[in-house]
Amino acid sequence: MPEAAESLPGLFRHIFTVPAEAIDGNGHVNNLEYLRWMVAAAQAHSDAAGWTLERYAATRSSWVVRSHHIDYLRPAFAGEELTLVTWIGDFEERSSTRHYLLWRERDRKVLAQAQTLWVFVEAGAGRACTIPEAFRSAFEVIPDGKEVLRTLRNSLPKAHFTP
């Protein structure tokens, strides 16, 4: 179940089990699945902060991806329990960088780390627009990824968190 990570305000955590349909011809999770999970976690984080799809529709706004950067460090396999943590690293006038860290629960090995540059747009028109203060104030910004790693190491004693 997705949840805010109590140890550091601004973190959002989702724990799940890899479904069999996520496996590709190489016998491990397909790279596109990681991207799907990250986008779903971003939406769940937004929902938890009160910015649901309905609220975006009411404000005639949305987010679009400008770029994704994913470092795939280790494979994941069907049936494994994974944890995906996401947080907002910054807000610019019309964009925001979101970070992700994915690890396997069994051995706490990091499987992937990523960043997405999201652009706030007018729904329908697709033009970039200023991120409203109501959105900015709904989220804690964590600009230092090293702080996230330190917090996770301290809150999960067996964690390795070494790429």
Image (spheres, helix red, strand yellow):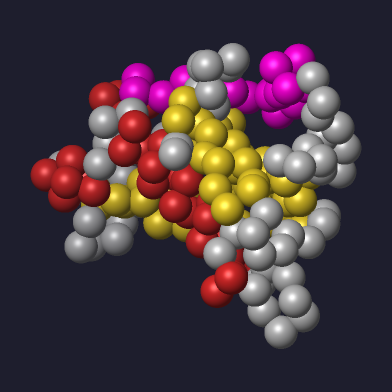
User: 112 or 136, which is in the foreground?
Assistant: 112
**Residue 1 vertical placement versus 53 (above, below):** above
Q: In the image, residue 64 lies at what x, y percent?
A: 40, 56
User: 23 or 31, which is in the foreground?
Assistant: 23
Q: In the image, residue 89 lies at what x, y percent?
A: 58, 31
Residue 19 shown left or right of residue 63 in the figure: right
Residue at the (20%, 62%) spot, across then down: 124
Say if residue 66 shows up in the picture.
no
Locate the N terminus and report the quarter of the image it occupies.
Answer: top left
**What span is colored magenta in the figure?**
137-156
Is 153 within the magenta? yes
> Dividing the picture into quarters, in which one does residue 132 lie?
top left
Residue 72 shown left or right of residue 143 in the figure: right
Q: Residue furthest front?
A: 79
Is 75 within the magenta? no
Say if residue 107 shows up in the picture.
yes
Residue 90 shown left or right of residue 111 in the figure: left
Residue at the (54%, 48%) spot, across then down: 16
Q: Residue furthest left?
A: 58
Residue at the (33%, 29%) spot, across then down: 49
> Dividing the picture into quarters, in which one does residue 133 lie?
top left
**Residue 11 vertical placement versus 73 (above, below):** above
User: 138 or 105, which is in the foreground?
Assistant: 105
